[in-house]
Amino acid sequence: MTNSIGEIRDADFLFVIGSNTSEAHPIIAMEMKRAVRRGATMVVADPRAIWMTTIAEKHLQLMPGTDVWLLNAMAHVIIEEGLTDDEFIAEQTENFEAVRAKVRGYTPEEAELVTGVPADDIRWTARRYAATPRAGIYYTLGITEHSHGTDNVYALANLVLMTGHLGKESAGMNPLRGQNNVQGANDAGATPVFFPGYQSWDDEEVVAKYEQSWGAPLSRRPGLNLNEMMKKAGSVVKGMYVMGEDILLSEPNVLALEERMNGVEFLVLQDAFINETARFADVVFPAAVFAEKEGTFTNSERRVQRVRKAVEPPAEARADWEIVCEMARRCGVDWQLNDPSQIYDEFVRDAPKFAGISYQRLETEIHDGKTGIQWPCPTPDHPGTKFLHQGGVLRGKGLFTAVDYRPSEETCDIHYGLLLSTGRTLYHYNAATQTRRESGLDVKQPEAFVEIHPRDARGRGIADGDRVVVTSRRGSVTVRAVRSRQVRPGCVWMPLHFAEARANVLTNDAGDAVTGTAEYKVCAVEITRAEEGSAVEGLFPGAYFGLDGPGPGAEVESEG
Amino acid sequence: MSERNLITLNGQDVEFTAGETVLEVAARHGLEIPTLCHDPRLDPAGACRTCLVEIEGWRRMPPSCATKAMPGMVVSTESERIARHRETLLSLYLTDHTQDRTEAESYGPDQLFEMADRYGAEQDWGAMETVRAARPGDRNPYVHFHPESCIVCARCVRYCEEVEGVSAITLAGRGSKTTIATVDELSLLDTTCEMCGGCIDVCPTGAMAEKMPITRTARPERELEKVRSTCNYCGVGCQVDLNVDTAANDGAGRVVKVTSPPAGTTTNDGNLCVKGRFAYDFVEHPERIQVPLVRGADGELRAASWDEALERAAAGLLGVKERHGADSLGFISSSRCTMEENYLMQKLSRGVFGTNNIHQCAAT
């Protein structure tokens, strides 16, 4: 996030795209609700009628994967109607002309044909976004989990830059991080392209610095990202060390991955619970959970916060950091790191953006009425950074990037007539190794389901609660059908959490060319009825939301 | 306005910003005014009347939570008249509240008893017959409503509407029968409730309480040790207080409750969601892996010592490197683990095994 969570309540216009905020980030949703209560205008762009649309001024219900069309059309309107912030563009950006030329062809009328969003709504949203000084964009995996995810992000960034909604409070470009420590894991350099603190892996000065710091020769060869590692599992990647992830539940197209995993010669797994990946493990280390160890998580707004040990881990389980230290020792390297605060100090020593942060400061300091410190924080007396790009874009000039619409890798055909998107629900979390073990959460949402529009369900003879088989080119799973008007006709939606009905059996492992992030949000499927079931009232978002309850459309349906 | 924004508060001139209430100005200057119905996250209701103050020239005592500071106001928060009013009021509230303090505190901290102690209110004025309806059939797993403790301050109802925005609970009935209800007395599970537990967080008397600690007969909250940490679910980074029964599990401790730090002190502003507040059972789940496991000759995983498991793991990965080169190894770190652990994982990958094949599940 360029800006902070606490600034959301003071925003006057919120453009929420590809984020099911009230389910995936409930506390950020509360800030948005507060803003709307105060009088702010919210527009939600999402293929589903998520909860946030109930308080939004407009819901742009676009077809999955057509984001670039929608965003370029908004840029088209802003430029055509002279709503750009020309001073900001001239002083703080470069390459605007390329975008101007590119979006000329993206008219709202044509956008309507592709995205399904009325041209007038696109115009209205573009005008309001451009004309409101405190206007923020909030997005999540609905933007990034596409084969053209990077293009989506560029198209959003173009809107931010051309309207100058950057470097000021309650505005900016705000990706809401999915996991507790997505930010921290990237800060730490657990990515092939960066050393800790976002220092390029191929910058010779950086590599030399770390060679000296760690006292070891380092590779100059590029690394594989997660998507590539999964695609090359068994062929190129012959050994794996997996810490705290269930790749066989979370990765796309898992059946193909399972086959490739047979070619992996050795796999070490480190987790708190036995998961699907354990089937391929040669060694499993028992790991402590967050309540049993010390450390830091860094949240979406770059705020470094402490994790503290409350209870002892069970039996022989140990903290992940202890196990990794011990592994290094067994491989002949003693790091002599005996405490997470020592690890933190070593991390900041070579990472200038973080150099001012220490456990001691995290323990004692309060900034802006809140605990934790937001990086960048280069010196021990620096208070941290509430929002980025203040007084000038960080890289010198904000770079416009002209992007063209590319269809998703997979679209509907006569065999697979529905577009599947996957996502999270409020009541479970990711691979659900934790939440499926919560009696309470499992009462609320005990099994996997697929949301299907009544019109599509009727055509396939599917009643609410029926068990159905969802099939893609890669595999099939059996789940319960929930007839719901939350989804568009032609689109269906499934949660990703359930091991007995893995949505990722279906998903496409086509990755974004830059980030490798897989296309979890769009793949073609077909659905057939397996057996009659009974609708379970109140258990599923569709019914729970009341959207498929008796209403004006009910009689029409029963006739069909 | 050129006039400075000043009010006189108990004889001292203090500044305020436009729009601040007397209660907020007082709190900012370290002056505590008691209140039962106010919460900084909610619109002022002025309902409980415990926060009344005296303002020079005003005939009545106004509620400080709903009175905006105006330049030149002369405010007293303590006086014989205020003290008399508070005592009477708190004693009256206690007649509409369970007399059993031990029972009440088993549901949660009870600010009414604490306030009565602090301000010397009589606690023996008898009890009204309790006619407030409970919701006995509510099969929701988390939120318990204990009507005997309810004083109808409506903080829970207002939080549900104003902050969480779902309006799952409502005030129903009249007079002493007024209660906290759902539509048609439905279970919270079947309403728009999203189980955020905010109603529990804002309740001053423990009338809205957590089911799990009650059914597990946890000790009262004040006897638990609070450990401030960061929630391990999504990327918001809510601060949580893990409430630990330190004597449980033979001294290893047990998390029996998760509460949020006070509003206004952390990013989450006192709020939590269903997962952050309630989903901590996994910590002590019997399926947690207890000991290291290695795959035996029979193809099954079996228990092993740390020594054996570490040796096997190191030899296995080094063996792959020897046979196929460093870039045949893949290190998959985790955005669920700490920054420090991710740092070490990439250091292991790059510095010990010599490959840049290090990544994790982060995609945004």
Image (cartoon, coloured by chain):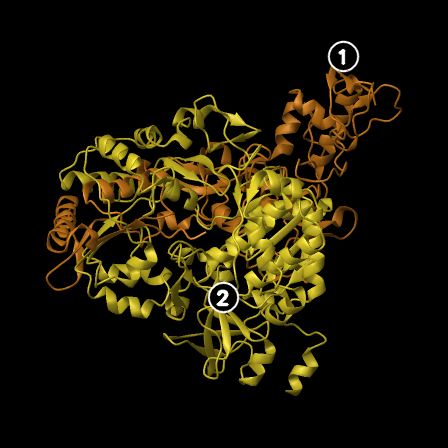
Find the residue positioned furthest to the top. B11
Residue at 34 percent of width and 46 percent of height = A193
Q: Position of residue A211 (x, y in %)?
A: 23, 34
Find the residue positioned furthest to the bottom. A559
SS assignment at label 1: loop
Task: Specify whether B362 is left or right of B189.
Answer: left
In depth, the one of A211 and B283 nearer the eye is A211
In depth, the one of A539 and B235 nearer the eye is B235
Query: Could you classify mark 1 by the number of other residues whose Cα lies within 10 Å: few (under 14), some (14-19), or many (20 or more)?
Result: few
Task: Specify whether A524 is left or right of A545.
Answer: left
- For residue B214, say whether it is visible: no
Residue at 31 percent of width and 59 percent of height = A228
Distance from disc 2 to disc 1, alpha carbons, whole Å, reads 70 Å
User: Splitting the image into 4 quarters, where does residue A214 fall?
Assistant: top left
Q: From the viewer's perspective, is residue A348 above or below residue A508?
A: above
Q: Position of residue A349 (x, y in %)?
A: 33, 28
Q: Position of residue B190 (x, y in %)?
A: 60, 62
- For residue A548, say whether it is visible: yes
SS assignment at label 2: loop
Q: According to the rendering, which colour does chain B have? A: orange
Return the residue at label 1: B11
In depth, the one of B62 and A28 nearer the eye is A28
Chain at tag 2? A
Query: Could you classify mark 2 by the number of other residues whose Cα lies within 10 Å: few (under 14), some (14-19), or many (20 or more)?
Result: some
Q: According to the rendering, which colour does chain A have? A: yellow
Q: Is the N terminus of chain B in the top left, top right, bottom left or bottom right quadrant?
A: top right
Return the residue at label 2: A406
The nearer-to-camera label among 2 and 1 is 2
Q: From the viewer's perspective, is residue A559 above or below residue B196?
A: below
User: What is the three-letter code of the residue carrying label 2?
Assistant: Arg
